[in-house]
């Protein structure tokens, strides 16, 4: 399936901003099952953009500098991407969680995609005994990895309520866990907390899901905005497998990976420094449309 993605971020400032320097992580990365066909980035009214090395995680980082005074700033990211990613099949067999944990500890892969970097707590996803104990019910060491991953994702979907007003972007996983509510970022962080507590390498994936579902299928939660889900390393043969605890499904043909890191802080779509006074308002809109449906 080929998708056209339009991601628009609009900043409205209470007073003129004299200078802004930001990191943009809006260009989807090269990842298994997806091929970026075209990409365009537009900044209005103006801004200098240059490639930058990713500080952490797997991301295409662009540095944006705005040097003229502005009251409004619009960043538009447009991608065309092809997705060819089958649904993982637990019935085909997968290694037990104990074998995955052992293989991750023994890995000598120093690349950003190596499993060892995703075994430990990170700034936004610390160790949490309550979450670890709750997740452990699905993470018996002898359980096949794929079976355990989808079971935990579906339990989070069933037991937690999607509530955009329950949490903020900096809400810690423990608070969302106690509320039994939040958004995709919260559910991904809760699942990653439990996986890492069990000695398993788990990464935070940021990206998109299709806005318009296939005929007869329900609309996925998280459309019309950037989405977040979990990647579990399932050994050297299977590699990284994605699972979406917000929707209780696998990462497959409806998911587009934008960036991967230990937590949201490493791969936020936009962050940086703005010099000015007054309030700031940010609006984000996302549209992910299959090319054939868009042309119909």
Image (cartoon, rainbow, N blue to C red):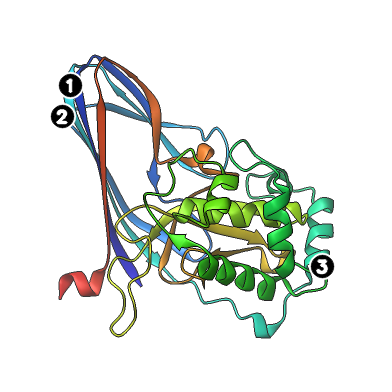
State the SS at label 1.
strand
Write the residue at 15% across / 76% down: 296
Look at the picture and state if 101 lies above or below 144.
above
User: Is there a contact, CB below 8 Å, between mark 2 and mark 1?
Assistant: yes
User: How many C-alpha atoms fall within 10 Å of the one at disc 2: few (<14), some, or many (≥20)?
Assistant: some
Left-right relation of 204 to 42 = right
Alpha carbon of mark 1 to alpha carbon of mark 3: how far? 55 Å
Q: What percent of the width, then of the height, locates residue 116?
A: 74, 47
Residue with the mark numbered 3? 141
**Could you tell me which quadrant the N terminus lies in?**
bottom left
Alpha carbon of mark 2 to alpha carbon of mark 3: how far? 55 Å
The answer, for residue 199, to whether it is visible in the render is: yes
User: Is there a contact, CB below 8 Å, between mark 2 and mark 3?
Assistant: no
Residue with the mark numbered 2? 45
Mark 1 vs mark 3, foreground winner is 3
The answer, for residue 115, to whether it is visible in the render is: no
State the SS at label 3.
loop
Alpha carbon of mark 2 to alpha carbon of mark 1: how far? 8 Å
Residue with the mark numbered 1? 70
Tell which circle, 1 or 3, labels the residue nearer the N-terminal end. Answer: 1
Tell which circle, 2 or 3, labels the residue nearer the N-terminal end. Answer: 2
Mark 2 vs mark 3, foreground winner is 3
Left-right relation of 54 to 281 = right
Left-right relation of 5 to 26 = left
Tell which circle, 2 or 1, labels the residue nearer the N-terminal end. Answer: 2
Q: What percent of the width, then of the height, locates residue 140?
A: 79, 69
Look at the picture and state if 116 lies above or below 234.
above
């Amino acid at each position: 399936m080929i998708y056209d993605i339009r991601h628009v971020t609009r900043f409205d400032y209470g007073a003129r901003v004299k200078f802004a320097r930001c990191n943009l992580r809006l260009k989807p990365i090269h990842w298994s099952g997806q091929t970026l066909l075209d990409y365009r980035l537009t900044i209005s009214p103006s801004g200098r953009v240059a490639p930058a090395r990713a500080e952490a995680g797997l991301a295409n980082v662009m540095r944006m500098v705005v040097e003229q005074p502005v009251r409004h700033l619009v960043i538009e990211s447009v991608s065309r991407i092809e997705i060819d990613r089958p649904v993982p099949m637990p019935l085909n067999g997968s290694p037990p969680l104990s074998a995955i944990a052992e293989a991750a500890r023994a890995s000598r892969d120093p690349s950003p995609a190596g499993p060892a970097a995703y075994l430990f707590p990170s700034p936004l996803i610390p160790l949490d005994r309550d979450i670890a104990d709750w997740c452990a019910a699905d993470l018996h060491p002898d359980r096949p990895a794929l079976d355990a991953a989808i079971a935990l994702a579906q339990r989070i979907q069933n037991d937690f309520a999607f509530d955009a007003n329950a949490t903020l972007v900096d809400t810690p996983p423990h608070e969302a866990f106690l509320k039994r509510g939040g958004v995709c970022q919260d559910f991904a962080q809760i699942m990653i907390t439990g996986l890492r507590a069990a000695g398993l390498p788990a990464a935070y994936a940021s990206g998109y899901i299709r806005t318009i579902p296939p005929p007869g299928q329900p609309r996925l939660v998280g459309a019309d905005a950037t989405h977040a889900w979990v990647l579990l390393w399932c050994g050297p043969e299977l590699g990284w497998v994605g699972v979406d605890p917000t929707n209780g499904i696998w990462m497959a043909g409806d998911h587009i990976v934008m960036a991967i890191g230990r937590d949201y802080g490493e791969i936020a779509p936009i962050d940086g420094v703005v010099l000015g006074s007054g309030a700031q308002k940010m609006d984000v809109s996302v549209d992910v449309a299959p090319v054939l449906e868009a042309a119909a």
